[in-house]
Image (cartoon, helix red, strand yellow):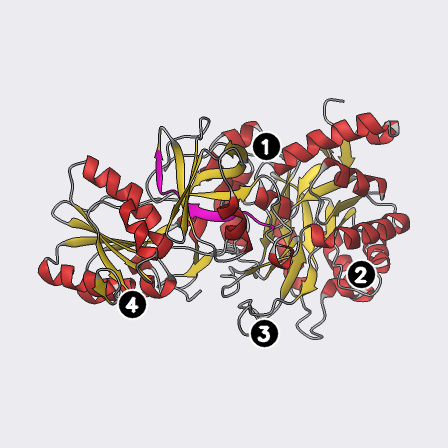
């Protein structure tokens, strides 16, 4: 894992790009280390963080890094509440508070297994940087991604050669992305699954991987106050009893270690 | 230097118990955490006799300028703490305060006795926001019960005893007085305010897995200041004040209210190095506002 600089630092947003209803923000991070695929950052707007709906947001929000390169860190956002609403307003020159990179990212597949990347909605973000890394290492990295509809599916351009599913059938396969995953596993079961998306999708992936005895690494999302193990708020139940902290034991966790992926 | 019941502190900013895991933070930030450790003493999470898994999620709920939590004191238990965590916490560059909780006096006695001969433990903080198994009331909300527990615990350790007072009581100055009379070497306050978080989509249901929780953050600061003022006016032992401190000016307000030291909690969630900034701002604030010499000695670099 890449170790984060201690404390919050303020970046300047360089670019805001709309992809359907999603917003991709790019911010150069000259003082930060290169993140590993699957790691995340805590983000907050440097100005007017607070005073939105219900007088929120107050705490920073956790986002997996989507890409990191000479242009900076890239994050994929979607408005789901007062925190993401404020972050999605940011444009070039606006200040972005960040802490990170944090947490444990993806491990490469065992020899003889091909990576199958399975993403839903804004959860495709960590799969983009992971696909880049796998392809650069000369390994296969097929991407299966699901969206609500064709407008959301415009974010599919963030991955290379994806197979797309939409709930309304307006683009690609009419149905669930996990149906694409099942057909891939039928064709070649020697796979390693990497998944990120809504809780119901991840729970379906976890159950499918267990049924097929295929290794799966899930990048989890959880309500999180701090991101560095302080608050103990972001726990998920473990198969053996007890809880893991998503922020420091994850956010990428072995599906077999989990009792279930909790509903949001 | 500040003298907090025998602990020599380099500056007046501590962490609130349960708001910083120095071991996890060292993994996340590396040795930079130790080089710039933000607190003048480190207060551990609450340790109980037996291990606890903590409450079922969800455990967090964001409010206007605050946070409701129901974490449920997950910890490895006394043995796991002493064997696994204590050696790592002893490597921190500041004195260690170990926070303990028991539901009976006998449990608390067992905890403080076990920590008494650990030289790495500079002081013990008692979390008395724990329901009495017999009455269901928090031990710390009843002055007589608090005094009885402290009288049992006090003779069993040579370490300074800090009592973390609960704000969920009719008269916090009276419980502080009871703690002082029964041998507390310092008191700290406030703990979280009892709070409820409704489910965002099913308002009749609780959001938090445990049903209810405690509120912290700037939303509680005015309440905390009132309670710190009331307690500091009543007792002679040092007071550690906390509740929603975000800036050096806020820290100065607590010191002006009579606190000897202050603690930062929820603000560290927003920035792991927030306490370092608050310390710097406090120094600048006091220098600019020309406060008394007695408060000036609490600042860094003096």
Residue at mark 3: B203
What's the CA distance linking mark 1 and mark 3?
A: 42 Å
Closest to the camera, between mark 3 and mark 4, is 4
Residue at mark 4: A168
Residue B29 seen in the figure: yes
Residue B219: x and y in percent read: 71, 54
What's the CA distance linking mark 2 and mark 3?
A: 40 Å
Chain under disc 4:
A
Residue B83 seen in the figure: no
Q: Residue A127, relative to residue A244: is it above or below?
A: above
State the residue at coordinates (66%, 63%): B106
**Image mark for residue B37:** 1
Q: Residue B42, relative to residue A83: is it above or below?
A: above
In the image: residue B146, left or right of residue A108: right
Region of the chain picked out in magenta, as a range: A58-68
As helix, strand or loop, the secondary structure at mark 2 comes to helix
Residue at mark 2: B147
**Around disc 4, counting alpha carbons within 10 Å, would you say few (fewer than 14), some (14 to 19), or many (20 or more)?**
some
Residue A129: x and y in percent read: 30, 41
Closest to the camera, between mark 2 and mark 4, is 4
As helix, strand or loop, the secondary structure at mark 3 comes to loop
What's the CA distance linking mark 3 and mark 4?
A: 30 Å
The stretch drawn in magenta includes residue A64:
yes
């Amino acid at each position: 894992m890449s170790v984060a600089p201690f404390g919050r630092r303020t970046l300047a947003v360089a670019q805001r790009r709309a992809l359907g209803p999603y917003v991709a923000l790019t911010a150069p991070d000259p003082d930060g280390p290169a993140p590993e695929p699957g790691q995340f950052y805590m983000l907050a707007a440097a100005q007017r963080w607070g005073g939105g709906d219900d007088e929120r947001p107050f705490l920073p929000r956790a986002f997996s890094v989507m890409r990191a390169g000479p242009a900076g860190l890239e994050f994929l956002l979607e408005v789901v509440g007062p925190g993401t609403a404020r972050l999605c307003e940011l444009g070039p020159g606006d200040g972005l508070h960040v802490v990170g990179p944090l947490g444990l990212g993806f491990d490469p597949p065992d020899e003889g297994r091909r990576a199958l990347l399975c993403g839903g909605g804004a959860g495709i973000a960590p799969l983009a940087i992971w696909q880049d890394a796998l392809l650069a290492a000369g390994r296969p990295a097929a991407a299966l991604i699901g969206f609500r509809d064709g407008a959301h599916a415009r974010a599919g351009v963030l991955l290379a050669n994806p197979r797309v599913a939409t709930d309304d059938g307006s683009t690609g396969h009419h149905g669930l992305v996990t149906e694409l995953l099942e057909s891939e596993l039928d064709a070649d079961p020697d796979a390693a699954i990497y998944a990120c998306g809504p809780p119901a999708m991840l729970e379906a992936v976890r159950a499918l991987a267990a049924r097929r005895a295929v290794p799966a690494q899930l990048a989890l999302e959880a309500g999180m106050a701090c991101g560095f193990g302080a608050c103990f708020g972001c726990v998920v139940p473990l198969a053996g009893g007890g809880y893991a902290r998503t922020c420091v034991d994850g956010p990428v966790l072995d599906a077999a270690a989990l009792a279930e992926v909790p509903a949001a | 230097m500040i003298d907090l019941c025998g602990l020599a502190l380099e500056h007046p900013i501590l962490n609130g118990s349960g708001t910083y895991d120095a071991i996890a933070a060292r993994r996340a930030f590396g040795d930079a955490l130790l080089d710039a450790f933000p607190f003048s003493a480190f207060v551990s999470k609450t340790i109980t006799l037996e291990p606890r898994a903590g409450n079922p999620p969800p455990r967090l709920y964001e409010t206007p300028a605050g946070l409701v939590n129901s974490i449920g004191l997950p910890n490895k238990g006394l043995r796991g703490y002493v064997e696994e965590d204590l050696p790592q916490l002893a490597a921190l560059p500041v004195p260690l305060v170990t926070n303990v909780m028991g539901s009976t006096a006998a449990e608390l006695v067992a905890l403080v006795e076990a920590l008494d001969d650990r030289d790495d433990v500079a002081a013990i903080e008692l979390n008395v926001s724990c329901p009495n198994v017999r009455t269901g009331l928090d031990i710390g909300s009843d002055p007589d019960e608090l005094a009885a527990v402290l009288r049992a615990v006090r003779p069993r350790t040579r370490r300074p005893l800090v009592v973390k007072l609960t704000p969920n009581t009719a008269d916090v100055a009276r419980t502080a007085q009871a703690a002082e009379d029964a041998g507390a070497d310092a008191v700290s306050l406030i703990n979280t305010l009892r709070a409820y978080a409704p489910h965002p989509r099913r308002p009749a249901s609780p959001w938090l897995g445990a049903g209810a929780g405690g509120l912290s953050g700037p939303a509680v600061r005015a309440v905390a200041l009132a309670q710190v003022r009331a307690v500091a006016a009543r007792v002679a032992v040092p007071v550690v004040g906390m509740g929603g401190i975000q800036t050096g000016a806020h820290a100065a307000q607590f010191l002006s209210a009579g606190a000897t030291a202050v603690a930062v909690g929820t603000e560290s969630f927003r920035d792991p190095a927030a306490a370092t900034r608050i310390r710097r701002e406090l120094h600048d604030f006091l220098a600019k506002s020309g406060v008394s010499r007695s408060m000036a000695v609490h600042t860094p670099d003096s």
